């Protein structure tokens, strides 16, 4: 498909970090670790085209059936997914703080644009408004289970997007988004995964989709996962010919070999170009089995919420285990105490405003 463009040039594979002065943990905008629902990371719900995609999609894998129908505005795209990621992240952050949540998420449009590394000029707001239209207009028919509920369902990814307040220049300020039951069921069941913030700096929709697949199947700490080329194309939802998809994928692999830009994982093709391998980057240094990592208790996570108020404690745990691994995997007499001490230092260094 022509729209899945990956022109090779000398520019960085990553988009520039538009807000480099913001440490993740300093500004309220970055309080919530980015999270995606596992169902749409597993299945090709979003279009990877860079042009309006008006094609209907049908996808079947095992018992899962998926039909996606666009509105006149086209299918919801991988970049439109930023809205869902932001909403899911806000809800999960509230749940982790013990707060009540609902399907309606209210936020400042500016905060979403900054958190997802988008521009905050007029074009950024117009693109966000267009994303709302595609997310609401795209119709999903599926039997894919979320939150343990199995049923045949027809829905939009968001039920409604409402501009609550606009500025004098016509830009949206406060926005309300009502998530579909299907998405909210996944959140309540905590069927979500934390994403690397560099996800928002990946230029190409296909790169983002590949990262989602790697994150879903490799997990964390993770192990290498292999897919046949036709399987990975199916999971990406790419409408390109097999030859064109292989070319697009090869370009991404070559850029990762050169720049190491792909978050968390390497992506490689075998010599025949028929087998795709995702490998967690830490695994290259003989990553220990998950059972060998320090065991952080649920009680310690509860205490971490008090020691580091406002933080996503599960993201803190993941960061701590990465820190422990990179510092030589020292033997710990008390893993909980070591983790809580690390959390205390993190909070002292970068306290979150509440």
Image: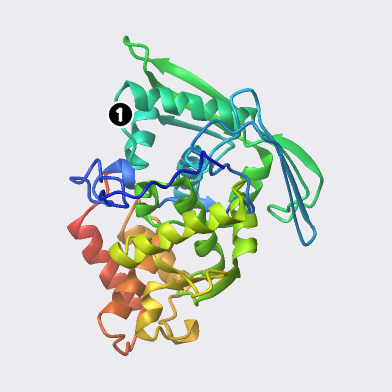
- In the displayed structure, would residue 239 be above or below residue 261? above
Residue position marked by numbered label 1 in the rendering: 120
Please state if 123 lies on the left or on the right of 58 as rendered. Answer: left
Residue drawn at point x = 37 percent, y = 12 percent: 170
**Residue at disc 1, secondary structure:** loop
The colour scheme of the drawn protein is rainbow
Depicted 111 relative to depicted 214: above or below: above
What residue is at 73 percent from the left and 56 percent from the top?
148
* Place of residue 178 in the rendered image (x, y in percent of width and height, measured from the top left): 58, 31
Which image quadrant for residue 288? bottom left
At x 31% / y 78%, what residue is drawn?
324
**In the rendered image, is residue 98 in sight?**
no
In this rendering, does residue 191 appear at all? yes
Residue occupying the point 56% across, 25% down: 133
Question: Which quadrant, please, contains the C terminus?
Answer: top left
Q: Position of residue 234 (x, y in %)?
A: 65, 56
Seen in the image, is 176 located left or right of residue 7? right
The answer to which quarter of the image holds residue 38 is bottom right
Q: Position of residue 340 (x, y in %)?
A: 31, 71
Q: Give whichever of 244, 309 is nearer the camera.
A: 244
Q: Nearer the viewer, residue 178 or 48?
A: 48
Instruction: Give the vertical position of 261 relative to 121 (above or below).
Output: below
The quadrant the N terminus occupies is: top right
Number of numbered markers: 1
211 with respect to 328 (left or right): right
**Depicted 120 relative to depicted 12: above or below:** above
């Amino acid at each position: 498909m022509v729209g899945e463009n990956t022109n090779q040039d000398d520019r960085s594979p990553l988009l520039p970090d538009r807000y480099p002065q913001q440490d993740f943990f300093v500004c309220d905008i970055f309080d919530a670790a980015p999270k995606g629902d596992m169902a749409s990371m597993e299945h090709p719900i979003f279009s990877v085209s860079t042009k309006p995609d008006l094609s209907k999609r049908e996808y079947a894998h095992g018992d899962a059936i998926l039909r996606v129908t666009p509105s006149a505005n086209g299918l919801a795209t991988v970049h439109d997914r930023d809205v869902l990621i932001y909403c899911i992240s806000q809800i999960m952050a509230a749940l982790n703080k013990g707060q009540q949540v609902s399907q309606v998420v209210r936020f400042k449009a500016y905060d979403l644009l900054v958190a997802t590394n988008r521009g905050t000029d007029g074009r950024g707001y117009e693109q966000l408004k267009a994303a709302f239209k595609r997310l609401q207009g795209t119709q999903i028919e599926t039997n894919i289970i979320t939150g343990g509920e199995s049923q045949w369902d027809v829905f939009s990814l968001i039920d409604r997007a409402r501009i609550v307040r606009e500025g004098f220049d016509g830009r949206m300020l406060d926005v309300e988004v009502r998530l579909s039951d299907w998405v909210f069921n996944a959140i309540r069941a905590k069927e979500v995964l934390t994403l690397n913030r560099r996800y928002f700096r990946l230029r190409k929709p296909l790169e983002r989709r590949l990262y989602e697949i790697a994150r879903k199947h490799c997990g964390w700490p993770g192990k290498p996962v292999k897919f046949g080329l036709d399987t990975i194309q199916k999971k990406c939802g790419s409408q390109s010919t097999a030859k064109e998809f292989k070319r697009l994928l090869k370009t991404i692999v070559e850029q990762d070999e050169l720049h190491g830009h792909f978050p968390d994982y390497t992506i490689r093709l075998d010599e025949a170009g028929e087998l795709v391998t995702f490998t967690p980057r830490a695994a290259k240094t003989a990553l220990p089995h998950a059972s060998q990592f320090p065991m952080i208790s649920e009680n310690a996570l509860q205490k971490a919420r008090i020691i580091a108020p406002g933080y996503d404690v599960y993201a803190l745990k993941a960061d701590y285990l990465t820190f422990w691994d990179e510092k030589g995997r020292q033997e710990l007499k008390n893993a909980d105490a070591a983790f809580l001490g690390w959390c205390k230092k993190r909070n002292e260094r970068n306290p979150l405003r509440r």
